[in-house]
Image: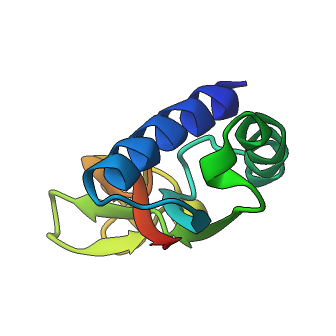
Amino acid sequence: MHELGIVNYVVKQVQQVAEENQLTKVNSVTLEFGEVSGIIPEYLLDYWDWYTKKFPLFEGAKLQYETIPAVTWCNACKKTYPTMQYGKTCPYCGSGETWLQQGREMNIKEIEAC
């Protein structure tokens, strides 16, 4: 259910950018978030459609997203590997001395506006 909080945050940030740049209409916002961030895209899109109706700036604005692959770093052998495929155990050396390098973040990547 944190998707509603994310939408609220994104709307506030985009409103601030729009105000600073004297924008009157947002056409789309593109987010990027990690595949292990826990964000459920369908919920995010539903909340976006519901929440942005409250703001004229966002009338008809689309939310788009891109997924950042989760990558884990192994301290033992100094290699990276796909987290979703192998989890916390390094496929190269079998070490559990690993940490998530990317894949949990969420960023506003692009705002299309006029």
Q: Nearer the viewer, residue 42 or 69?
A: 42
Q: Nearer the viewer, residue 114 or 67?
A: 114
Residue 92 x, y percent position in the rendering: 35, 75
**The N terminus sits in image quarter:** top right
Q: Residue at x 42, y 61 (%)?
A: 23
Q: Residue at x 46, y 68 (%)?
A: 111
108, above or below 1, in the image: below
Way the structure is coloured: rainbow
Residue 18 x, y percent position in the rendering: 39, 54
- Quadrant in the picture for residue 54: top right
Q: Nearer the viewer, residue 22 or 33?
A: 22
Residue 9 x, y percent position in the rendering: 48, 33
Q: Residue at x 65, y 52 (%)?
A: 58
Decide if residue 84 is in sight here: yes
90, above or below 1, in the image: below
- Quadrant in the picture for residue 107: bottom left
